[in-house]
Amino acid sequence: MTNERASLGFTRASPVDIEPDLQRVASWGRLSNEPHSVVPLLDRTRLQLPLRGPDDRGLAHGNGRSYGDACLNAGRTLWRTRGLDRFIAFDATNGILECEAGVLLKDIIEVVLPHGWFLPVTPGTQFVTLGGAIASDVHGKNHHAGGTFGDHVESLLLHRTDGTSITCGPVAQREWFQATVAGLGLTGVIVQARLKLKKVPGPWLHSEALPFHSLDEFFSLSAQSERSWEYSVAWIDCVGARGRGVFFRGNHGQHHEATPRTRSRAMPFTPPVSLVNRWSLRAFNAIYFRAHELAKGHKAVHYASFFYPLDHVLNWNRIYGRKGFYQYQCVVPRLVEQAATHELLAAIADSGMGSFLAVLKTFGERVGAGLLSFPMAGTTLALDFANQDERTARLFDRLNSIVLAAGGRIYPAKDACMTRELFERGYPRLAEFMPFRDPRISSGMSRRLLGS
Ligand SMILES: Cc1cc2nc3c(=O)[nH]c(=O)nc-3n(C[C@H](O)[C@H](O)[C@H](O)COP(=O)(O)OP(=O)(O)OC[C@H]3O[C@@H](n4cnc5c(N)ncnc54)[C@H](O)[C@@H]3O)c2cc1C
């Protein structure tokens, strides 16, 4: 066990004036809003990566959907990539798409789906850029069948701060590719990429919801579903009856119905304190579980509801109040997944913290495309926690020690406070990655976990 403390290292900037050329930027967890020098990147054909002087360091910033400090670089430069938003080529016969790195996954789907193609892997939000999806090597509900996002990237173009550019892929310049996929923006700026899409019959999925009452049941449903269901994931009740949840599985399928217009709603304000607490959670979870017990079974679901239910509530991250929130996502290896998941859930239940958004999923055997890819064969648990300072730090210390003892790892795209020891032990290929770092790039996370 480690003595190193999970330090909740974020500070909220005081509301004093900041230099006019600086902008406050927060990530999805809204734990900090520090000033950055924000430079939009607009034209990939004349791309410069400007810095403010010899001591400055820059970082690519996609759509800020990382929860912690992977996409932040307080006091330094952020190269905002959303302006790199052009589609370059689309081969609708073979499902090969080439576009700039600032294009959102949502826009990709809207272009390719009418031609019978879909993303081969998608995270739980479509408001993520192509570059951000590669730099975190994101996973979805189909890891057991489709691996990670990087497995489907045929090539990418990387710009470095020394003015050089590198085209790399799983074969050509392979070592650069392996460092940049899941490289958290630290090897350079991904400017464009070529992606192999997945053939689908349309926008619908056949899905099934199965309430379960114990973790053993979850593991057996997972094992049974892997062969015949492409997508699977479970919601788990982290405060109520231990081990109860709802298992969701789905496959792309045909369905003849008009596509519904999904109306998005927005969280209209940020409450001073979190609306998620022990009591609201207990009540909400009980209702949610009961509703799925009553409505269990098969149905046809639109892809937006199946993959992106959270996207229907814009700014839902405000619900945790002004102090923001953490997401804790870990994976524990197959051999110990059952015991370690029990232990993690028991620690969370004891703490009385946690949130409605608690997700459990088994990963397949595929080795990640990047040196620092997160998934490993085993079980991943992801939960949001309102920021309660010391209380949250104590819980994370406990969770970290369980993950460390199990030989697991934490997901950097969600992280804001893992210890260096956990990072180094969880990512044994870190030493291979280091020579590919761009010396004039840093992030809040790289300074915290790598010292620069
Ligand atoms: C509601 C929600 C659900 C999510 N579900 C999942 C999930 O199911 N699975 C999963 O894996 N993740 C999930 N995530 C996390 C999210 O997919 C990742 O954090 C993703 O990297 C965010 O992309 P972004 O474009 O917002 O990039 P940012 O958050 O802005 O940046 C993320 C990282 O990518 C780097 N980066 C961004 N663009 C470039 C570029 N052009 N070149 C080089 N580096 C770049 C940044 O430097 C940073 O290190 C979820 C996030 C949210 C908010």
Image: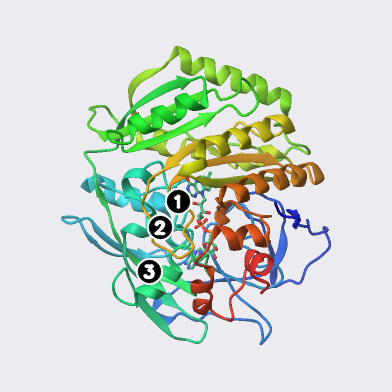
Name the foreground residue: 199 vs 410: 410
Could you tell me which residue is drawn at 60 percent across and 18 percent down? 286
Q: Quadrant of residue 191?
A: bottom left
Residue on which disc 3 sits: 192
Residue 16: x and y in percent read 84, 62
The numbered mark, 3 or 1, whose residue comes first in the sequence reads 3
Q: CA distance from mark 3 to mark 2?
A: 21 Å
Q: Is mark 3 within 8 Å of ligand 1?
A: no
Residue under label 2, please give it. Answer: 368
The one nearer the camera, 351 or 123, is 351
| Tag of residue 344 | none
Q: Are marks 1 and 2 in contact (CB under 8 Å)?
A: yes
Secondary element under disc 1, as helix, strand or loop, is loop
- Mark linked to residue 376: 1
Q: Is residue 298 visible?
A: yes
Q: Secondary structure at mark 2?
A: loop
In the structure shown, which secondary structural element does the residue marked by tag 3 occupy? Answer: strand
**Residue reaching furthest top?**
294
